Image (spheres, rainbow, N blue to C red):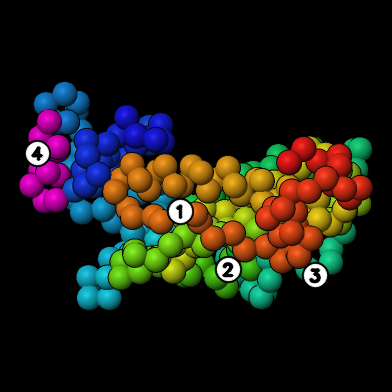
Amino acid sequence: MGYDPCLYVRDTSHFVVVYVDDLLVFGSKQQIVKEKKELARSFEMHDLGKARWFLVMEITHDWVAHTITIDQQQYIQKILECFGLENMWSVSTPMAVNIKLPKLETLEVDQHLYQSMLRSLMYVTIRTQPNIMFTVHYLSQFSVAPSLEHLMALKHVYWYLNGMQDLGITYHGNWIGDNIIRFTDSDWASNTNSQRLVSRYAFIFCGAAIAWSAKKQLTIALLSMEVEYMALTHAGKESTFLEHLYKNIGIPISPPIFLLVNNQSTIALTENPIFHTCSKHIEV
């Protein structure tokens, strides 16, 4: 059993990734052939050959450039057609700048339609489109009582994907010796409905994002320094997980993982967690 519940490891060069009844086998050609024969003796299975599709993601190999690209162009086209938005114009951003949407008590539009459109976007967000993570997170807060304004903001994301559907994530095999870089950021009291901050992070490895998140915190921060400190904590848990996971499958990672944050007070507190009036309510 690997560090992840979907990961089964024989050794660092031979492992299997499983999701429900779909699986990917990693290893040398001889190891993969042996593994598939062992699985076929125990389970009824179909061998689809070299990985080209997995969980609605298309996988493209470039053996000359040593790159792997994953995208969901066909899935995005499918959901655009499902909601009748395939012939609409495209926009350059997933959400209007400085948009502030109210939270309502009663719904004004079809709740099922809003939630269906949102659910379809989430599958893209967690797979291949980290650029819409914050927007989808923000719009999901209005799924109980959506209005026409909320629905139009949701359609705006689809218009954005309509122009970006052919873009994917490309990983460069020649850069596997580089370390993971982590970016964190937060907004402070920008949510006029709850005043709670949203912590965001992105991890970059082999030239592209490998993990990303946008999460509303449970408490209200008093200072911008505290906001960024919460974001570092949120991302720090993912850092620990990735270190163990990569070690599990034999990818060389030299800890510590670089942490990039744009707040000098947070950096100072992290390097020297002294007790003073601005941080005495934070346990460090």
Out of 9 and 130, give the one closest to the viewer.
9
- Crowding near pointer 1: few (<14 within 10 Å), some, many (20+)? few
Disc 3 and disc 1 in contact, CB within 8 angstroms: no
| Residue 185: x %, y % from top left | 70, 59
Of the numbered discs 1 and 2, the one sitting upstream in the chain is 2
The amino acid at mark 2 is Asn
Q: Residue at x 29, y 48 (%)?
A: 250
Of the numbered discs 2 and 4, the one sitting upstream in the chain is 4
User: What mark, if any, has residue 108 been given in the picture?
Assistant: none
Of the numbered discs 2 and 3, the one sitting upstream in the chain is 3
* Gap in angstroms between the C-alphas marked 1 and 2: 39 Å
Disc 1 and disc 4 in contact, CB within 8 angstroms: no
Q: Please, is residue 170 above or below residue 3 in the view?
A: below
Q: Residue at x 27, y 70 (%)?
A: 66
Task: Write down the residue under mark 2.
Answer: 162
Disc 2 and disc 3 in contact, CB within 8 angstroms: no
The image quadrant where one finds the N terminus is: top left
User: What mark, if any, has residue 255 been given in the picture?
Assistant: 1
